[in-house]
Amino acid sequence: MKRCRSLFAGLFAAAGLLPGLPAIAQIDPGPAPPAAAIDAPAPVSDEAQQLYTDALQSIADGRKNDASATLSRVIEHEPLHAGAWLDLALIQCALGHAEEAERLFAIIEVRFAPPQEIVELIASTRQAGCAAWQPLSQGTLSIGRGITQNANQGSSRETFEASLDGVPIELPLLEEFLPRHDQFTTVAGDYYRDLNANGTTGFAQFQARQYDSLHEYNSASLLLGVDTPWRYRRWTFRGSAMVGLTTLDGGLYQRLLQLQMRVGVPLPLSSRYQFSVTGAVSHANYLTLSNFDSNTVELRSQFSYRKDDRFGYASVSALSDRATGDRPGGDRRGWLATLQWRQALRAGVTGELGYTQQEWNSKDAYSPGFIDVARRQSNRTLRAALQYPVAKSQVVVLEGRQIRNHENISIFQYNDRQLQLSWQWQLP
């Protein structure tokens, strides 16, 4: 596994080092003249350079087979593109094609005058050897303790507004519908593993929360899925299929199926910026609730920024949720907006700040004759976190959340504040 990781590191290192490699004149079949005898580097066509950029993107996406094919096309157009030769050699080695990798390394040494860094990279790759392709995997495991002011999402109002025979009435809420404070323990983890040499990945995510007193609100969720990338010219695509299970109080509560497609839009932006559009279709099945099953369609635009020790993300989604049965309120439409910023601070600490707002507007009255209004929901969540590395592959995370759920139906209004301290391990 370490040998495979070193090859990946070499691929990305080559992308930065190779622009300094001098190209040489057109080579006729047979022995090439020494690089030192060449007076001027050969220019690279726009088409070849675009193909090379596409190949580097394929490498970044983990699509080694696609990258290999694209790099071969680069060399066909520009036989003197040193970067394409080296990247192709390293990919062939990562795929376990030792003879082909050695042939390419020999060509690089004969035809080009690589700098010392590239010479050392080739030597270390030869020493490590070219084993058969091995899947990469990574994961995290987190255990935490937290406190919440409103474990049951109890109403922020002590009375409930309704109507009786068209006459507005105000009823007191039972204690069980009011906010209940508690502490909890969480366990969470995720695991990702390559399924093939062209970027297809399988993943699993798990999360469980157990309260000290309010055991009826204990929950757990498991998400399993497959994700695969591909590319068409400068457009990038990533499709995924997921299945999820959620339990509440020890019993199966919800099943979720989702298909998703993300499209990277080739805008004339710096490499620090990325813009993409995502479409998703999901089906939720509630095992303990009648008439709450639904199908949801989401269209999301995403914009991200990355530079050294900082990362920013913004997205806006349009949502349509259609009930499959006689759900209270019927169909609903809404939108979701997310802002996130992460930045390295002092002494190894990383800070995160995030804001999410979700709006839902139901089509029909929630309960005709008793609650004669269509539900209007506005949920706003503010999150802040600090991460501090305490050892190799171990991080302590302090996280705070503030939730404000404003609704026109008073019984659904609630506020909550949560504070959680977690210890996280990075798994090999």
Image (cartoon, rainbow, N blue to C red):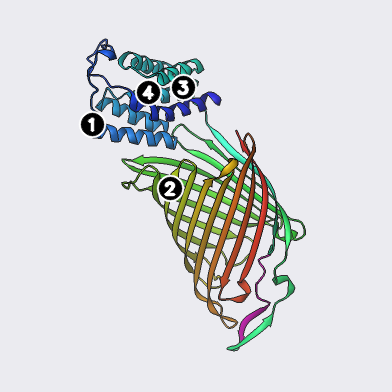
Q: Which of marks 4 and 2 is nearer the N terminus?
A: 4
Marks 2, 1: nearer the viewer: 2
Label placed on residue 96: 3
Q: Where residue 28 sits in the image (x, y, percent)? A: 22, 14
Disc 4 marks a residue whose amino acid type is Leu
- The residue to which callout 2 is attached is 305
- The residue to which callout 1 is attached is 45
Q: Where 310 falls versus 39 (above or below)?
A: below
Q: Distance between the residues labelled 3 and 1?
A: 31 Å
- The residue to which callout 4 is attached is 86
Start and end of the magenta stretch? 152-163
Q: Which of marks 3 and 4 is nearer the N terminus?
A: 4
Instruction: Name the one closer to the observer, 35 or 251.
Output: 35
Q: Is residue 398 left or right of residue 69?
A: right
Q: Where residue 234 sits in the image (x, y, percent)? A: 32, 42
Characterize the local packing of mark 3: few (<14), some (14-19) or many (20 or more) Cα atoms within 10 angstroms.
Answer: some
Q: Earlier in the sequence, mark 1 or mark 4?
A: 1
Q: Which residue lies furthest to the right in this view?
A: 213
Instruction: Name the one closer to the observer, 202 or 53.
Output: 53
- Residue drawn 58% across the image and 51% down it: 244
Q: Is residue 368 left or right of residue 78?
A: right
The quarter holding residue 50 reads: top left
